[in-house]
Image (cartoon, rainbow, N blue to C red):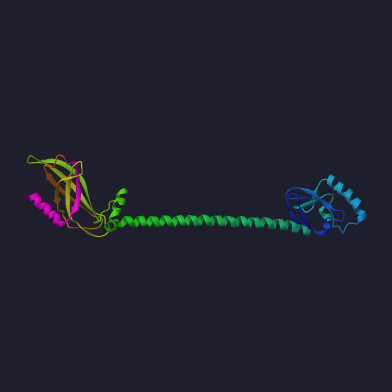
Amino acid sequence: MILTCPECATRFKIADDAIGANGRTVRCSQCSATWFVAAEPDVLALDEAEEVTEIREEIIRDPVENIGGKHATDTGADLDEIDDTRPHDDVGKNVADVGAHALIREQADRKKARRRIFGVGMIWLVTLAILALFALLAYVFRAPIVEKFPGTAPIYQAFGLEANAGGLTISIDKTSYGNNEGVPVLFVNGKVKNIDRKTRDVKMIKLSFKNEAGEVIASWVVEPAQSRLKPGKTLDFATQYPNPPIDAVKLAPNFVKETDARSEATKLSQ
């Protein structure tokens, strides 16, 4: 016989003869609700109806006791009065099965959640790794990239990185004023650096004075001490300029072609 709790709808399986001919009040082990279970209609005789009613009233008044040990209880009956206890074991087994299934579903849901979190984490990890790789390659090969795509130079400069199409950069380390036989002289110390991954030819260096408007008002050419520079190496240079313009506000270094350098050198010698 299958009993269903009217409160929580929990189902219990018990032996057909556990209720008896007079019926029995039982209690749900899940929600503690009590209700009366009558015998099957074909078991009761019509002339026993009045007796069943009286027994039912007596059962409701009496305390409810445990029948199945865990799942259903009756009154006025000990566990020994029920000959076959295996159906009650089935009730416990069914409830245990329900709990086991719920635990399995919970574990499966947790595994799915972990897999989703792991999948999202891997996507972000791979994405960040790809971006980091691109950033590294863009940094290492910045000279060829700027040489092929000159428009990328301002991007590198925005991040504070040196980038030059020729793979070489020029910087002014120090400037100072002195006097040479009564003539004021500007002394300049600078540096050429190879930021490329291959050896580069060092071109002539052109230093230009600029006024507040950014116009070149004077310039001269410096020949480097060596013509080739290995990757990552630096080359120092030193030069001087007599009688620097008084309206000069900036000294700008740059590389020039050899033909232009010779032209500038010729002008200065005249």
Judge by depth and name the residue closer to the eye, 268 or 102.
268
Residue 83 appears anywhere in the view: no
Q: Residue at x 81, y 54 (%)?
A: 79
User: Is residue 253 part of the magenta span, yes or no?
Assistant: yes
- Relative to residue 224, is residue 133 drawn left or right? right
The tally of labels here is 0
Judge by depth and name the residue closer to the eye, 27 or 50.
50
Residue 204 pos. (x, y %): 16, 54
Q: Residue at x 91, y 55 (%)?
A: 46
Name the quarter where the N terminus is drawn: bottom right
Residue 244 sits in which quadrant? Answer: top left
Judge by depth and name the residue closer to the eye, 121 or 252.
252
Residue 87 sits in which quadrant? Answer: bottom right
- Relative to residue 16, is residue 135 drawn left or right? left
Residue 246 pos. (x, y %): 14, 39
User: Is residue 7 part of the magenta span, yes or no?
Assistant: no
Residue 115 appears anywhere in the view: yes
Residue 126 sits in which quadrant? Answer: bottom left
Residue extending farthest right = 47
- Relative to residue 88, is residue 105 drawn left or right? left
Q: Residue at x 12, y 52 (%)?
A: 264
- Relative to residue 256, is residue 104 drawn left or right? right
| Span of residues in magenta | 248-270
Residue 117 pos. (x, y %): 52, 54
